[in-house]
Image (tube, grey):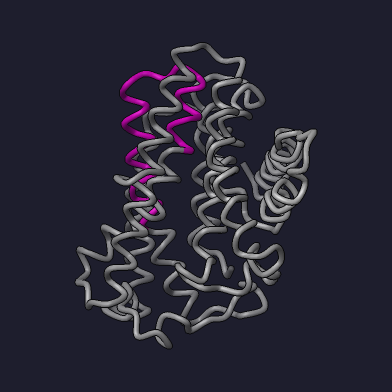
């Protein structure tokens, strides 16, 4: 697969996803327009659509037509977007901008932003429940997504991250945050694609291993970009970790060693894909992520 073909597939996936995430928003007949508008604002505020793309492509690798996994893919993107809305709130990271535009709470107020995040979270599970896939697949998907986004997954990672803002974590502790805060939701995306397709245990384990290593590589790359990235490209201020005296992977290992580790973790992720037939697109997408500038 050459770069042109890769881009064509990626653009098509993103087109399908961006249409679907809006079509599947709740339709309200009372006076909930403001919160739905806030949900839509945050969903359409840019983003790589990394997680839903992985969901669709793992479904395809396991033999399912991608469109049949679209409800699962949208659910993962709703969870991701809710987490960003809540992360930006004054009680959390207190960020005024997200991808170069005002954060949800700056646009709609804190109360509406909080409710928009809650609504996206609950609507994600409603969407899975209403999917045309079998009841067993829907139940499995709900179980995985709830676990990966909950206390022992993404939320747990955020809790630990907040704790370490007041301490000086070591490398092992930072990797634990990366695994939970970032890797868990990437893992759910890959797993939900496999679940939609009825994949066996070996493929589920391989998808989880891929996501584990890629999630760590992805977050280390984020730490690197916070030091050497371009504010205009990133759509957010750089140097915030250093400004807040936050201990990061890069502050402990330096740029050069951190970049080597990004490549090492990515190689380990790619080696997990041997359980899948045609995984060339996923391999190229992983490469794009570790070489990104934003």
Q: Which residues are magenta?
A: 189-216
Give residue 196's position: percent from left, percent from top.
51, 22
Q: Residue at x 60, y 59 (%)?
A: 111
Give 185 or 164, whichever is nearer the viewer: 164
Main SS class of the magenta portion in the image: helix
Give residue 190's position: percent from left, percent from top.
46, 36
| Residue at the outermost front position | 30
Give 186 or 292, whichever is nearer the viewer: 186
Residue 100 vertical placement versus 134 (above, below) = below
- Is residue 179 one of those drawn in magenta? no
Q: Residue at x 34, y 80 (%)?
A: 246
- Is residue 32 left or right of 282 when viewed as pictured? right
Give residue 150's position: percent from left, percent from top.
37, 43
Q: Quadrant of the N terminus?
A: top right
- Is residue 213 one of those drawn in magenta? yes
Q: Quadrant of the C terminus?
A: bottom right
Give 80 or 233, whichever is nearer the viewer: 80
């Amino acid at each position: 697969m050459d770069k042109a073909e890769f881009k064509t597939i990626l653009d098509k996936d993103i087109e399908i996803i961006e249409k679907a995430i809006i079509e599947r928003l709740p339709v309200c007949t009372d006076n909930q327009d403001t919160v739905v508008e806030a949900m839509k604002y945050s969903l359409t505020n840019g983003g790589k659509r990394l997680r839903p793309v992985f969901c669709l492509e793992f479904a395809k690798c396991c033999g399912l037509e991608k469109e049949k996994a679209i409800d699962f893919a949208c659910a993962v993107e709703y969870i991701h977007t809710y987490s960003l809305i809540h992360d930006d709130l004054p009680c959390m990271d207190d960020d005024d901008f997200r991808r170069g535009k005002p954060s949800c709470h700056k646009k709609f107020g804190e109360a509406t932003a909080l409710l928009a995040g809650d609504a996206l979270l609950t609507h994600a599970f409603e969407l899975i429940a209403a999917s045309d896939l079998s009841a067993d697949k829907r139940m499995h998907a709900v179980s995985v997504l709830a676990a990966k986004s909950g206390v022992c997954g993404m939320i747990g990672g955020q809790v630990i991250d907040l704790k370490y803002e007041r301490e000086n974590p070591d490398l092992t502790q930072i990797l634990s945050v990366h695994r939970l805060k970032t890797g868990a939701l990437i893992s759910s995306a890959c797993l939900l694609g496999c679940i939609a397709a009825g994949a066996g245990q070996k493929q589920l384990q391989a998808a989880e291993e891929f996501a584990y290593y890629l999630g760590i590589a992805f977050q280390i790359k984020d730490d690197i970009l916070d030091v050497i990235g371009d504010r205009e490209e990133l759509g957010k201020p750089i140097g915030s970790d250093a400004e807040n005296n936050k201990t990061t992977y890069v502050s402990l290992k330096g740029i050069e060693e951190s970049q080597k580790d990004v490549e090492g973790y990515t190689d380990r992720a790619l080696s997990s894909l041997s359980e899948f037939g045609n995984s060339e697109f996923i391999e190229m997408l992983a490469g794009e992520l570790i070489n990104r500038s934003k």
